[in-house]
Every structure is written in structure tokens, then in C-alpha cells.
Image (cartoon, rainbow, N blue to C red):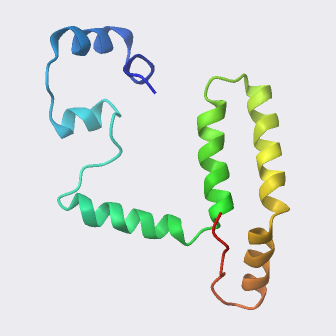
Amino acid sequence: MCLRELLPLDQAVELTLTGRQFDAQEALDKHLITRIDDDPLNAALALAETIAVHSPDAVAAAKRLFQQTRVLSERRALRRERWLQLKVLLGSNQREAMKARMEKRTPRFKSR
């Protein structure tokens, strides 16, 4: 994603033409970053652990959905989302998730 898609045009032009540096708080205010943390490494590891408990197929499909649909019409984006959901729902990791839930255990997903 490029700066002109993330910021209003005047702000993107100003930052590009001036090369002005800004701190983390301004980046957060402009929605260029998600959060500020005193210990970014541990925060990133905790986030990764949270994501890692989910089906790798579902995580990959969600990432693909955001990447592929940001420039599509709503109708085409929903069609793409439906296709990706179907692919996940028919996969072996989804079956494992359902089985693990019924057996009240942690799922053992296959890596992609």
C-alpha cells in the first residue's frame, strides 16, 4: 500500500516533498501504525502467538482477502470472500477445528 492510499493527498504530498520525520505518536494519529508499545518485540510475539492458534488456512485466506479485495467493487469483493470461505470450510484444517471443539481439545492444524 502506498502513502497516497493511507493519507489525505495533502498530507502525503507534504511528507513526500519535505521528507519531514515524525514520531510514533503522529504515526499512530495518522493511522500509519496500529499501536505503540514500550516493549515492541514482546508485543509482536504475543500477537503472533494469538494468531498462531488459528487455522493456518483461515489466517492465509483472511490475509489474501484483504490484499486482493481492497480495489474491488463490493460485489466482486463479496464474491471473492465467499470463494475463500468455501475453500477454508472444505479444508482438512476446518475439519480438525470442528473435531477438536467437539472433543474439547486444542486443534492440531497441518501447516500450509
Q: Nearer the viewer, residue 22 or 55?
A: 55
Q: How many numbered circles does the render carry?
A: 0
Q: Please state the horizontal and vertical placement of residue 55, each as a whole percent of the image.
A: 65, 67
Is residue 23 toward the left or the right of residue 90 in the image? left
Q: Residue furthest front?
A: 112
Q: Position of residue 68 (x, y in %)?
A: 65, 33
Specify the quadrant of the image occupied by residue 39. Answer: bottom left
Look at the picture and state if 71 lies above or below 56: above
Instruction: Name the residue at 74% across, 70% down.
Output: 93
Q: Is residue 6 left or right of residue 15?
A: right
Residue appearing at x 52%, y 68% in the figure: 52
Q: Of 25 and 67, which appears nearest the observer? A: 67
* Occupied quadrant, residue 12: top left
- Residue 100 image point, x, y percent: 73, 84
Is residue 103 positioned above or below 88 on the image?
below
Q: Say which residue appears at 14% left-offset and 19% top-offset.
A: 20
Examine the rendered structure and indicate whether residue 87 appears above or below residue 42: above
Check the picture and name the quadrant holding the C terminus. Answer: bottom right
Left or right of 19? Residue 5 is right
Q: Image point 70% across, 90% down: which residue? A: 104
99 to 91, vertically: above or below: below
Query: Which of the 4 image quadrants contains residue 82?
Result: top right
| Image coords of residue 96 (percent x, y) | 76, 78
